[in-house]
Amino acid sequence: MGTADPDIQVFIDRFGRFFEETGASRSGGQILAWLLISEEPQSLDDIAAGLHISKASASLGTRQWEQSGLIERVHKRGDRKVYYRLPSNIAHSLTQASLQKFHQLVELAELGRDAIGADRPSARAVLDQFVRVYRHLNERVPEILAELEEE
Amino acid sequence: MGTADPDIQVFIDRFGRFFEETGASRSGGQILAWLLISEEPQSLDDIAAGLHISKASASLGTRQWEQSGLIERVHKRGDRKVYYRLPSNIAHSLTQASLQKFHQLVELAELGRDAIGADRPSARAVLDQFVRVYRHLNERVPEILAELEEE
DNA sequence: CAATACGTTTAGTATTGCTTAAACGTATTG
DNA sequence: CAATACGTTTAAGCAATACTAAACGTATTG
């Protein structure tokens, strides 16, 4: 690794494993970790070299995060390379991604509610409650995040 | 499947795939779906038969969900079998599980913050912001959920 | 106490999908 | 226009793990 610091090593490793267990790939998590501790935007080569992964993995990983809005491209003038960095509000982005997952789940819940007949009242009630809680969260969470801006 | 209803089929299938993509197993997601649309608590045999999965899978899946607090055991008197059902506040449980994930991420962020030196001020600022946002969310979200109870 | 019911563990198989090297396409440079 | 720089795609290898059948342990029944 570019940095031989063992603490940073451990950080990157744990971060990678966390995302590995959460549906993403290990290298994907490592990329996020790497950008978290980088002062400057990083090129694909920077990332690949820094994490000892192939450039192909770096390319794949950055694209996936970029599509989900968790990292962004930066261009330096007079430089053909593409650089990546975290958006300034990374915590907000992650929260948003979390709500997005919830949203998918709620859509499935609605699918289920429509699939079961009127002969399953309590199951229907559970699914309805589910939708209600999410709607409320989706409304409130942005407000909560906004509270932090005011400080 | 016990129920031949194609809509329910689709629901279970999609639900299973959602969890498959989110780190859990497909059968694990299917179990959750099955309990969501069940009026009565379900035994391992009910689940295995209903989903056409092995009893071993049903046993594994239910234990995992139970450990994370997303389903609970029920006993019927005069019956040796163990039955499973969703807790009454399933949406709350899921939200809590979500915050729990966030909490792990924040612990990692703190690890990273301690790993980098004072020579990386902006990276440090990002990690600090991350921790701050989470602390606020963790404080507020339970309040938000409580708002729903009052209706 | 034999037979059954029930849940868990284990070992093996199959599947999934991550990772990489190499090939490729395209733009840029001298 | 040859050579280089850069990012993406592809094909293949490999590691992780989900899933199952079968064996197992234990409690319960008649």
Image (spheres, coloured by chain):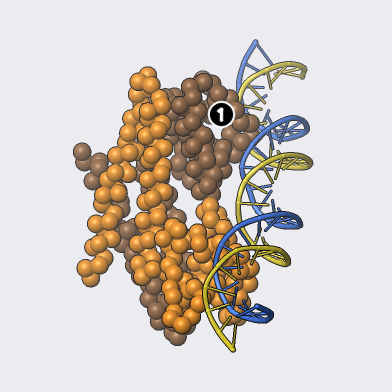
Chain colours: A orange, B brown, C yellow, D blue
In the rendered image, residue B12, in percent from the top left (x then y), is placed at 49, 32
Residue C21 in the image: above or below residue B31: below
Q: Secondary structure at mark 1?
A: helix
- Badge 1: few (under 14), some or many (20 or more) residues near its Cα, within 10 Å? many
For residue A106, side relative to residue B73 (left or right):
left
**Residue A19 in sight:** yes
Q: Quadrant of the C terminus of chain B?
A: top left
Q: Quadrant of residue B103?
A: bottom left
- At 45% from the left edge and 85% from the top edge, which residue is drawn? B119
Chain letter of mark 1 equals: B
Q: As rendered, which of A13 and B67 lies closer to the eye?
A: A13
Residue C2 in the image: above or below residue B24: above
**Residue A14 in sight:** no
In the rendered image, residue A60, in percent from the top left (x then y), is placed at 56, 61
Q: As rendered, which of B30 and A35 lies closer to the eye?
A: A35
- At 35% from the left edge and 62% from the top edge, which residue is drawn? A92
- At 40% from the left edge and 81% from the top edge, which residue is drawn? B121
The amino acid type of the residue labelled 1 equals: Leu
Name the residue tied to disc 1. Answer: B51
Residue C14 in the image: above or below residue B2: below
- At 27% from the left edge and 45% from the top edge, which residue is drawn? A136
Q: As rendered, which of C24 and A33 lies closer to the eye?
A: C24
For residue C22, side relative to residue B126 (left or right):
right
Please give the count of numbered marks on the rendered protein: 1
